[in-house]
Image (cartoon, helix red, strand yellow):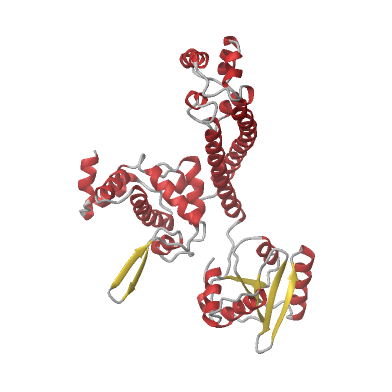
């Protein structure tokens, strides 16, 4: 999104979206009359409504205020070039409503009218939705969907671990990684200790070789299998947990394959963007974080006037509240959670790859900060550095930054010496 000069519109619309129908409140320019109605959420109904507006107002620009930046209704409205979309934060609408309705009563038509009022009275504070290019928008969805699948994978492996601890805990020590094909294949073929102990040594050896297990590991692992003692022989425990394990393994197998498919799609698409090289060379970025950081910054360099705006939007910058003699600093709650997650996770990874990042993290921990607080502080600092690189289209260089720290006489230089 970006700010555009205030322009003249033929009409103004507040749209309160819902799953099946959308509440509409329209006011034509130069008129005090407001027209309310409901718009059915079907491609045909939305297209017919937009065409009627085009005909009624002669194709002149019409401003539409709504609580979304993406989604089905946004995609449908964007196909009509005369509709100019002004997204507004849902919390802004809620607070505006509460200011005049202390009872907190809520209704879709009234919310549509509230959004219309925000558009009419505070349009100078709203930003026009200006979508990025198709490549960036595609990559944006790919990296976020992939991260959700990773969360699913973690959830499934946690449940699988919990289930196996009830009757077959030994298998957890035989395989360090639970989100792998070999782990899924092993449990599919031998879901219990008894089943795997009945297997011939040659069968087990062939299984491990087919899954490219190192030769030196195979014999000790087979010996551990043959010598293991069962945790329980109670069928009342084993039978239901075997059913659960089989179900979880099937889901995990599909999820792992889906993540691989997303990785392939991202690896094919990300390098085609001209800004990808800026993020590919960052310490610890790799094939996962480089595309996510590219998406986090985007391609609209006018979107953020300063690094602090990005720090605030991403939820990395803390919030300070002052009232009288009271001052409170707290976690920023209203932000893009995925964006914050991207910066924090990469900052944590950069500690292993960047000399100064490792020193800065150690400095923060020495001050008494928790791991999470120290990592967020590092992410805050990284955003300032990357913002400059992004704006000037200059690849990050570790030695250049270390020299800059030395020229400024930064206290971090002393910590660098201690870390080394």
Q: Nearer the viewer, residue 109 or 248?
A: 248
Quarter of the picture holding the C terminus: top left
| Residue 391 horizontal side relative to residue 78, left or right | left
Picture quarter containing residue 315?
Answer: bottom left
Name the residue located 43 percent from the left edge and 58 percent from the top edge: 391
Residue 412: x and y in percent read 24, 50
Residue 147: x and y in percent read 54, 46
Quarter of the picture holding the N terminus: bottom right
Residue 76: x and y in percent read 70, 64
Specify whether residue 206 is in view. Answer: yes
Q: Is residue 340 above or below residue 22?
A: above
Name the residue located 57 percent from the left edge and 39 percent from the top edge: 156
Specify whether residue 272 is in view. Answer: no
Name the residue located 22 percent from the left edge and 55 percent from the top edge: 408
Picture quarter containing residue 79?
Answer: bottom right
Residue 177: x and y in percent read 50, 30
Q: Nearer the viewer, residue 213 or 11?
A: 213
């Amino acid at each position: 999104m970006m700010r555009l000069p205030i322009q003249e519109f033929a009409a103004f619309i507040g749209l309160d979206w819902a799953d099946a129908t959308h509440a509409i409140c329209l006011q034509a320019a130069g008129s005090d009359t407001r027209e309310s109605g409901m718009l059915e959420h079907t491609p045909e109904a939305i297209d017919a409504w937009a065409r009627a507006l085009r005909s009624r107002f002669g194709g002149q620009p019409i401003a539409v205020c709504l609580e979304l930046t993406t989604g089905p209704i946004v995609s449908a409205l964007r196909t009509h070039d005369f509709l100019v979309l002004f997204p507004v934060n849902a919390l802004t609408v809620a607070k505006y409503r509460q200011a005049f309705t202390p009872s907190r009563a809520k209704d879709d038509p009234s919310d549509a009218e509230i959004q219309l009022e925000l558009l009419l009275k505070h349009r100078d504070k709203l930003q026009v939705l200006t979508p990025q290019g198709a490549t960036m928008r595609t990559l944006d969805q790919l990296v976020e969907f992939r991260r959700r699948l990773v969360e699913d994978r973690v959830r499934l492996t946690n449940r699988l671990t919990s289930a196996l601890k009830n009757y077959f805990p030994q298998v957890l020590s035989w395989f360090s990684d639970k989100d792998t094909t070999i782990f899924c294949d092993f449990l599919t073929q031998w879901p219990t200790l008894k089943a795997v102990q009945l297997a011939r040594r040659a069968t087990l050896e062939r299984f491990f070789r087919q899954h490219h297990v190192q030769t030196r590991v195979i014999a000790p692992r087979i010996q551990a299998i043959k010598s293991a003692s069962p945790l329980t022989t109670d069928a009342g425990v084993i039978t239901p947990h075997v059913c659960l394990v089989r179900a979880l393994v099937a889901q995990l197998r599909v999820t792992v394959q889906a993540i691989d498919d997303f990785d392939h799609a991202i690896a094919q698409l990300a390098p085609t963007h001209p800004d990808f090289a800026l993020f590919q060379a960052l310490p610890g970025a790799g094939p996962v974080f480089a595309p996510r950081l590219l998406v986090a910054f985007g391609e609209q360099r006018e979107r953020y006037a300063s690094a602090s705006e990005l720090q605030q939007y991403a939820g990395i910058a803390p919030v300070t509240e002052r009232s009288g003699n009271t001052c409170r600093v707290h976690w920023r709650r209203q932000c893009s959670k995925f964006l914050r997650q991207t910066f924090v996770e990469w900052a944590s990874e950069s500690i292993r790859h960047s000399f100064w990042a490792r020193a800065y993290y150690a400095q923060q921990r020495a001050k008494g900060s928790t791991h999470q607080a120290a990592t967020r502080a590092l992410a805050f600092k990284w955003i300032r550095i990357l913002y400059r690189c992004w704006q000037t289209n200059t690849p990050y260089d570790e030695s250049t930054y270390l020299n800059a720290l030395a020229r400024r006489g930064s206290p971090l230089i002393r910590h660098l010496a201690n870390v080394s």
